[in-house]
Image (cartoon, rainbow, N blue to C red):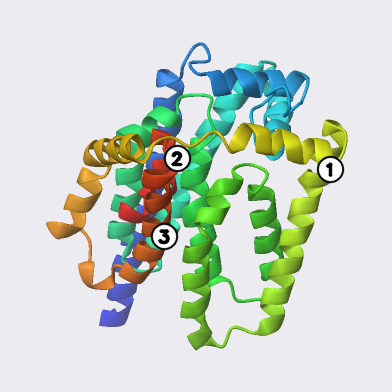
Amino acid sequence: MRSPNNDHQTVFAKKSSGIAWGLLLLCAVVIISRIFTAEHLPAGLDSGNFMLGMVDYSVAQERPHSPGYPVHIALATAAQQLVHDPHMALLVLSILWSLVAVIGTYALAMAFVDRRAALLAAALLAANPLFWFYGSVAETYTFDAALAPTLMVALLRVRRPSSWMFIGVGVGLACGLRPTSVVLLLPAIGAVLMHRRHNELPAPSLHLAIGGVVIGLASWLVPAIIMEGGVQEYALAVWALTHNSSGGVASNAASLVSTLVWTITIAIIAPVIGWKHRAHHPWWLALWWSVPPLVFFATMHHQKGYLLLVLPMWC
């Protein structure tokens, strides 16, 4: 005679298997949908600059534009060896980051809600029109959607002290992809570390993380400086093309609000109508993750793709 515990374990295993297959299917849908909707030619100036940078890297000549994205260029160049086309290589990276973003959002949601709600969060992100668009063009913005949830779940779940060095290296490398995004996530990173103080986070772990950041930064910053001709040349090239990039507060705020209206409406409605467990929603993380970037986008500089940095939190 089977015990109730065995029956419960069987049901749980079936549900877990179903969710796993659901996540796998969602990833397949993301890949296929982005392939079918991918741009045929570079649609923006940035994409063209990235392609030029893959041939002859120079921040001063905007190949690519500041801050240079050296890690992105290196990854795209590596991908080009497989697909033999620079534009296709950039699209491969966009799709890859889209996959990481969906899986990372699922993993982060699992830290606070059940499997079904986590799968819903991942599906909401995958179907989001802004996220879908940037997953189909040769830009870097889907990296933001991949970085934020993946970094947060790593910080929340890491246990072994040695793993902190790998997280640090990842953060350092991320600075070579989209450094502004890393800076804007610092308040959220600090909030997670403060939250983990209750688990007696050992100081050596933080020391290892800082060491990892230095290693990650050096791995791309030193070659970038050498290719640009020296520290002064690199600094001048980055500064000359960066400090004039901000727009007016009114135009930035208007663009931000209009994008928010049609971008995260569904994500906000979902928890309100009970699709997710509101009691377990990490509002403290949502605030530290969302408010600083949104303030920056509204007052300093805004481009619709920047919202992918905060979008996974609201799915």
User: Disc 3 or 2, which lies upstream in sequence?
Assistant: 3
**Residue 301 marker:** 2
Image side of residue 121 versus residue 149, left or right:
left
* Image point (36%, 45%), residue name: 298
Q: Of the residues shown, which amino acid type is indicated by label 2?
A: His
Of marks 1 and 3, the one in the foreground? 1
Q: Of the residues shown, which amino acid type is indicated by label 1?
A: Val
Label 3 sits on residue: 289
Q: CA distance from mark 1 to mark 3?
A: 33 Å
User: Disc 1 or 3, which lies upstream in sequence?
Assistant: 1
Query: From this viewpoint, is residue 81 visible?
Result: yes
Q: Residue 112: x percent and y percent?
A: 35, 69
* Image point (21%, 45%), residue name: 266
User: Disc 2 or 1, which lies upstream in sequence?
Assistant: 1
Badge 3: how crowded within 10 Å, few (<14), some, or many (20+)? many
Q: Of the residues shown, which amino acid type is indicated by label 3?
A: Trp
Q: Residue 95: x percent and y percent?
A: 51, 32
Q: Secondary structure at mark 2?
A: loop
Q: Residue 60: x percent and y percent?
A: 73, 27
